[in-house]
């Protein structure tokens, strides 16, 4: 899985980038078909940094989560939690779809 961390309107230190990568890499355990995670940190309003996570998966459209908070790490945690929920829901849909029995019997 490829993880890209980028910043808009500012700069993130390499240490901060690696911490973000470590935190976001845990999303792989919720859905194993993830191919890429793109994390964008928007520092235009330094008092309220915005974080966007875009997850690309095999045979599925991209999932997106946004979070704006007063602190960078709260924004990252919030966006990560939202993405976890989306991945869980998608995994349940995929898993349940295969096990649904039709009401029609031959």
Image (spheres, rainbow, N blue to C red):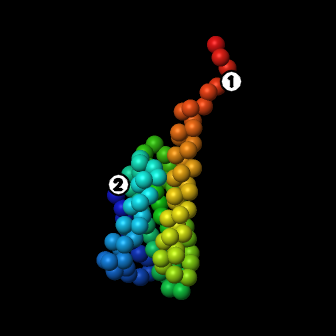
Name the N-terminal-most of marks 2 and 1.
2
Q: What residue appears at the point 52 percent right and 76 percent down from the top-left corner?
A: 74
Q: Nearer the viewer, mark 2 or mark 1?
A: 1
- Within 10 angstroms of label 1, few (less than 14), some, or many (20 or more) residues? few
Compared to residue 43, the image places residue 30 above or below, namely: above
Compared to residue 33, the image places residue 74 above or below, namely: below
Q: What residue appears at the point 57 percent right and 50 percent down from the top-left corner?
A: 89
**Foreground residue, 42 or 92?**
92
When asked about the image quadrant of residue 23, the answer is bottom left
- Please state the horizontal and vertical placement of residue 32, each as a whole percent of the image: 41, 48
Q: Which residue is mark 2?
A: 1
Give the quadrant of the C terminus. top right
Q: What residue appears at the point 33 percent right and 71 percent down from the top-left corner?
A: 18
When asked about the image quadrant of residue 6, the answer is bottom left
Q: Which residue is mark 1?
A: 103
Q: Secondary structure at mark 1?
A: loop
- Please state the horizontal and vertical placement of residue 26, each as a whole percent of the image: 41, 60
Q: Secondary structure at mark 2?
A: loop
**Foreground residue, 42 or 88?**
88
Whether residue 56 is visible here, answered yes or no, is no
């Amino acid at each position: 899985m490829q993880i890209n961390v980028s910043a808009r309107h500012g700069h993130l230190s390499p240490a901060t980038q690696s911490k973000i990568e470590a935190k976001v890499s845990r999303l792989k355990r919720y859905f194993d078909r993830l191919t890429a995670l793109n994390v964008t940190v928007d520092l235009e309003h330094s008092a309220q940094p915005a974080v966007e996570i875009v997850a690309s998966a095999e045979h599925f459209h991209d999932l997106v989560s946004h979070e704006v908070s007063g602190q960078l790490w709260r924004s990252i945690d919030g966006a990560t939690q939202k993405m976890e929920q989306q991945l869980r829901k998608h995994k349940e849909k995929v898993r349940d779809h295969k096990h649904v029995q039709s009401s029609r019997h031959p």
